[in-house]
Amino acid sequence: MISGKASCGLQYAVKKSGSAVGYCALSIRCGTRDEAGYHAGIAHFVEHTIFKGTEHRSASVINSYLDRLGGELNAFTTKEEIVFHATVLKEDLSKAASLLLELATCPTFPEHEIQTEKGVVIDEIHSYKDTPSEDIYDRFEEMIFKGHPLSGNILGTTVSVKKITRDELLKFVKEKFQPCRMAFTVVADIDEARMEKEVLKLAEKYFGGSQADCPSAHGCEERPFPCGSYSTPVAEQFDKTISKRNHQANCVIGALAPSLYQERERLATVLLCNILGGPATNSILNSILREKYGWVYGVECGYTQFADTGLVAITLGCDKANLDKCLKAIDKEIAKLQSEPLSERKLKAAKKQLLGQLAISGDNGETQCLSMGKGLLAYGKVSSGKENRSLVEGITAEDVREMAVKIFDKDKVSKLIYI
């Protein structure tokens, strides 16, 4: 793998793979938490409308450009990132890379396209509201991050989306889409050195100049608070039940957790969540709530990491008659993890499972490409599989127990129920 930084401040990484399919992504360090001074949901709305035209291509040309090559063009928005990515045959990578950078540097946001897309996004908002499992998690985040930029809903609201203007979109892109906030990544069966030259050439074409010309350059090198001063949220505990008259009861139980930059605590939390409610059927909560008793269709323990904090949340949906039994079982299993460290055998098995999941996930070219972009934005580097393995192997049973105690402290854990 080759990585570096162009003179304009754009970070990049190029990795050779053995596939005929090529992946490239442009990751931008700005998301929902960076919307101060703008209408809520503008980051996500930019992601939607940026494909509607540039100074050189119309919406129809953009939509069909990679389709005609058998490729795909996609994007997503998180609380801290906007990411544009493409999948093409390796011989078409340069075309895909050029298109991604063109979208980010000279979008036009035609007025008629904005109005059309508002209807699409508002429909998306309504669809989430109609899905209790989605809506309850958004509400939980709003409540636990109350008063903090991380509380904002990624989609915004019907009212806020209607108020977004073309001038606002152009201003947001001009202010936030700076090369010093970006990472460009490529995974394909290509010559790495040759692709590096192509990336640098495109960076010069679309950005030119130097990092000194970047209005947002100041502070972009600072970690753990990149591109601005992020204030760590302070959560107020809550235990709230909302009547929704749904067929099913939905519940989220969670608390603040380590940030991206608390390395040892973060990795111990990753392992803890995987043991407690990871994707495998043998995770503790899956084994008990689903496999043993059949009380739920699914239960998860997820961990979201941000620059200044993190969020661990157990989510489940069940028949209303089973809710109390589920909650008591969850409390019981957490108490076990808090009171006694895992045995050497169980810890070894848990690490093996996590490393296997990471290896399988990382074998996917698109996953690699997106992960590389996140690594560059967060840490200024891409960690190797060997480094990650070493870090996971270094986690102790006491590390896991300590995180169970800290995160699931009864004075800090919050709960939201839809019933």
Image: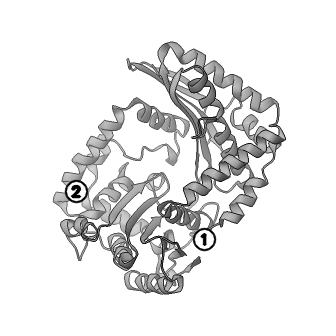
What residue is disc 2 on?
A: 114
What residue is disc 1 on?
A: 221
Q: Position of residue 316 (x, y in %)?
A: 52, 29
Q: Residue at x 46, y 34 (%)?
A: 139
- In the rendered view, would you say 199 is above or below 228? below
Is disc 2 placed on a helix, strand or loop? helix
Q: Position of residue 378 (x, y in %)?
A: 59, 63
Answer with the quarter of the image where residue 203 lies: bottom left
Amino acid type at image mark 1: Glu
Q: Residue at x 45, y 19 (%)?
A: 419
Of residues 419 and 296, the one drawn nearer to the viewer in this rendering? 296
Q: Position of residue 287 (x, y in %)?
A: 62, 29
Q: Which of marks 2 and 1 precedes in the sequence?
A: 2
**Classed neighbour count for the residue bearing mark 1: other residues with Cα under 10 Å, few (<14), some (14–19), many (≥20):** some
Q: Is residue 199 left or right of residue 279?
A: left
Q: Residue at x 23, y 52 (%)?
A: 117
Report the residue that reaches farthest toward the left: 112
**Classed neighbour count for the residue bearing mark 2: other residues with Cα under 10 Å, few (<14), some (14–19), many (≥20):** many
- In the rendered view, would you say 182 is above or below 206? above
Amino acid type at image mark 2: Ile
Of residues 406 and 217, the one drawn nearer to the viewer in this rendering? 406
Q: How many marks?
A: 2
